[in-house]
Amino acid sequence: MGKDMTAETGNFDALKQRSFFDVGPKPYGANPLFSVELLKTLSEGEMTKLELERKQLFQLLGVSSVPEITNLLTDPVKRAETNTRFIHELGGSFGIEGSTKEREERITRYAEEADSVIQYLRTSIVPDFNSDIEMVNEVQATNNPLDLLLITFDKKYNKQARFEAKRKLILMRIAGSIDQTERELGASDQFKQFQDFLNNHVWNTELLIGDSTTAHLISEHDPDTFGCESVVVSQEKPQKELQPNQKITTIRRRNFQVDGKIIPIYVTTREKSPDAKIMKLLRKGGENPAVAVEDGLGLMGVLDNARDIKLFENHLMASAIKAESPMRLEDIHDSLKSGGGTGTNNESSNELRMRKYFVKMGKIRVELMLFTNSAYLDYRYKKGVSHQEYEVRRLFDSGVIGLLFPQDLYELDYNTMKSKAISSIRSRIETE
């Protein structure tokens, strides 16, 4: 099997197999989370986690014992009463205001986000193994948290279904925590304010908001590494057929003015999807949702060369002073010349060339990543550096794949999955 791809999973013990949260061959009694017989095998720390999980669950359900939970499997009236309480209390724990129906609608959204994590991995990360990790139909169709919880106790369901029900509940909990933090921080409002600042003070105000021009980056790439060796910017798309190791990358560029000179810049919003935020929290192995929210919204800028990047940074800060909203740059990492990644993540390539920092203006804090044309093309296409490859590697190497699809349930060879996924990416990049 090679490297243990399930080891770096931090605080998400409830997802781990071969742990005190293991989903055994049979529900209840074979699951140490609810089995008195196996409590003596736990360490002090494991006992504390177990006890706190039980207390939180009992409190949300309004019960005092496991049999009261399992009795809901055969008592539809009590189950309906408990469901109303559970939804209301669970919604309140995520700071969701409004009626029980309104809370239920938002919790249903968390369930859909949990499903989208698995769907994204199946179709975008390891499509060759799509059928191997497909969800059990009944679990995918179930969005009610009480129904999912009861599946984990129900002997009519097999081990995989009970694990996937538990997994979905945990992913829903992560989605709810992230949503609550975003609402508390006002992340979307902050980003809109920053975009308003750019439109009113940074971009060329002689143009309408959204005006841009099309540019084609015609690049030559090293046949071995597919790193960018040269790039020419053309306003017209070449009609002749591309040579091997050539690429045409089309971008739409805005511009800004410095001392009467117009400088083009390609700017794109880097907004993480809900499933991407959930996976980031899993990768980091911590349950603090602010980790996933911090860089959930940001901008990527691509300029012709390093000189234009410096001009843009000077213009950005000068514009903030003119707007009476002075800014400061935090967590600055610069590898434009030397590579060396961002300095914050051991999973990033040593050859990644970029400048990255957070722009802080009052309550606004937005991540900004800046590339030259050639560095951006490496970020897109270079072997071992491209963001698509990076995404695959970090999901495997951080243990997320092993955490969500434990080997004893799915019988997967993670190294083969990883190799095939990266090979597919390289094939698409180098042949399209």
Image: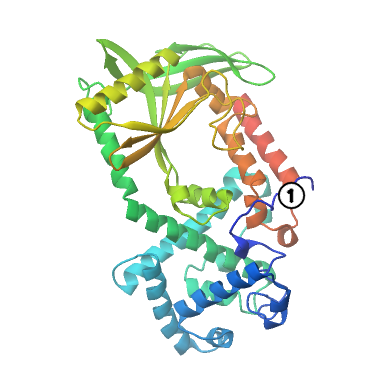
Q: Is residue 250 left or right of residue 428?
A: left
* Label total for image: 1
**Crowding at label 1, few (<14), some or many (≥20) Cα neighbours within 10 Å?**
some
Q: Nearer the viewer, residue 258 or 161?
A: 258
Secondary structure under badge 1?
A: loop
Judge whether 323 appears above or below 104 on screen: above
Judge whether 343 appears above or below 375 on screen: below
Residue drawn at point x = 57 percent, y = 38 percent: 345
Judging from the image, the colouring scheme is rainbow
Residue at the spot of label 1: 4
Judge whether 221 appears above or below 33 on screen: above
Query: In this orientation, does residue 209 appear?
Result: no
Residue drawn at point x = 58 percent, y = 52 percent: 285
Quarter the C terminus occupies: top right
Q: Is residue 390 left or right of residue 261?
A: right
Q: Is residue 204 left or right of residue 118?
A: left
Estimate the x, y position of residue 368 in percent, counting from the top left: 41, 32
Q: Type of residue at label 1?
A: Asp
- Seen from this angle, which residue lies furthest front? 44
